[in-house]
């Protein structure tokens, strides 16, 4: 299959990004970030998660974040992560229009992340996904550690395919394949993605790379050649994973837009506006932007 002419960027910064920042941001700042990203043309923006605030205080008050964004309804989908029935009930009460459940291809990571075995997590997700679909919500399923695990090392492609197929089978419309610790390289990323696509269809696959070893863009490019049409990215390269020691930021949205613009692939995202959103959130966090494109554009703006 060949590269698509149009790619959807699925923005994870307000969730995967902010969940890993030591500074806990006020609700208004999280809302302003999502508004900025919507203004830049992003149409699916992960808004937060309904997980234990003891584990992840950065994601507390996601209900208030959604409540501040009702003006975006109908234009922008705002998915939220739910780990269990309690999280799903909270998401419904907050009128979420889209949820994501998150499993892993590694037993050790699954235990550390959500205190469940892979099988237990899938059993817990099944009724949630069924109910969410019946209520008209869209549902994404994540598979973490698809190219390596911080605790177990190498992960078999067959383990990834098994979990992805289980999530798709219970009704997740899109499966995001997460290289949680960013250890993958292009050929491995392509082979793993191809194996999952063979099982569930490339139209149901999204790719999610972290940039720990600077390989995220190369991995995206390798997977685009398979016909992948959804790529996850995080503004300013924010992020990592609190349960994956050593995992640095996600692929930066600015870097991805720059690549896709250069390839002539349509995204609907305005590079200057997303870079401005990146600068604003980095100021709020008191951190330097990690996006190379963001840094280059900021230097040009100053000239
Ligand atoms: P547990 O300890 O097994 O749960 O945690 P529990 O049912 O025994 O409850 C423990 C406490 O948590 C109780 O409170 C519950 O009320 C509370 P206490 O009695 O101690 O005061 N609780 C909740 N509170 C709010 N919302 C809930 C909820 N559930 C229980 N939904 C749990 C299980 C999953 C809750 C916990 O382990 C957790 O919150 N983990 C956080 C997981 C997480 O968010 N990880 C990061 C996202 S995954 C990721 O980043 C990877 C990804 O980006 C893809 C990639 O890169 O690969 C998606
Ligand atoms: Mg991630």
Image (cartoon, rainbow, N blue to C red):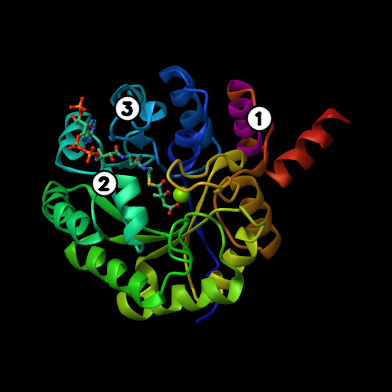
From the viewer's perspective, is residue 39 above or below residue 10? above
Question: Dot 3 corresponds to which residue?
Answer: 54
Is the C-beta of the residue carrying label 2 under 8 Å from the nearest atom of ligand 1?
yes
Query: Which numbered dot is residue 115?
Result: 2
Cα gap from disc 1 to disc 2, whole angstroms: 35 Å
Compare marks 2 and 3 and give the one earlier in the sequence: 3
**Magenta segment main secondary structure:** helix
Residue 100, magenta (yes or no)? no
Q: How many labels does the image show?
A: 3
Give residue 279's mark: 1
Residue at the image point whose x is 13% and y is 46% from the top: 135
Of residue 205 and residue 211, the one placed in the foreground of this image is: 211
Q: Give the range drawn in magenta.
A: 274-284
Above or below, comparing residue 111 to residue 302 in the picture: below
**Where does residue 79 sit, x and y in percent of width and height?**
33, 42
Residue found at the very far right of the displayed protein? 303
């Amino acid at each position: 299959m060949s590269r698509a002419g149009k790619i959807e960027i699925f923005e994870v910064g307000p969730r995967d990004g902010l969940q890993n920042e030591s500074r806990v941001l006020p609700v208004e700042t999280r809302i302003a970030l999502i508004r900025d990203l919507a203004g830049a043309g992003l149409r699916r923006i992960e808004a937060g998660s309904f997980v234990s605030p003891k584990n992840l205080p950065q994601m507390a008050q996601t209900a208030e974040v959604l409540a501040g964004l009702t003006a975006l309804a109908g234009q922008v989908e705002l998915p939220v992560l739910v780990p269990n029935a309690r999280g799903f009930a909270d998401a419904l009460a907050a009128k979420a229009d889209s949820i994501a459940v998150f499993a892993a291809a590694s037993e050790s990571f699954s235990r550390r992340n959500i205190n469940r075995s892979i099988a237990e997590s899938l059993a817990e997700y099944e009724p949630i996904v069924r109910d969410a679909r019946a209520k008209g919500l869209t549902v994404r399923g994540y598979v973490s550690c698809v190219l390596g695990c911080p605790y177990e090392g190498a992960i078999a492609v067959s383990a990834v395919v098994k979990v992805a197929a289980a999530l798709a089978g219970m009704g997740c419309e899109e499966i995001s394949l997460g290289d949680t610790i960013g250890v993958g390289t292009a050929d491995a990323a392509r082979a793993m993605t191809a194996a999952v696509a063979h099982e569930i269809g490339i139209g149901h696959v999204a790719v999610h790379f972290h940039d720990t070893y600077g390989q995220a863009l190369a991995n995206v490019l390798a997977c685009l050649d398979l016909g992948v049409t959804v790529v996850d990215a995080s503004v300013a390269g924010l992020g990592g994973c609190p349960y994956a020691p050593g995992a640095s930021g996600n692929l930066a949205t600015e870097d991805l837009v720059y690549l896709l613009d250069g390839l002539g692939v349509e995204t609907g995202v305005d590079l200057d506006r997303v870079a401005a959103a990146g600068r604003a959130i980095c100021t709020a966090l008191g951190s330097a932007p990690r996006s190379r494109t963001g840094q280059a554009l900021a230097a040009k703006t100053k000239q």
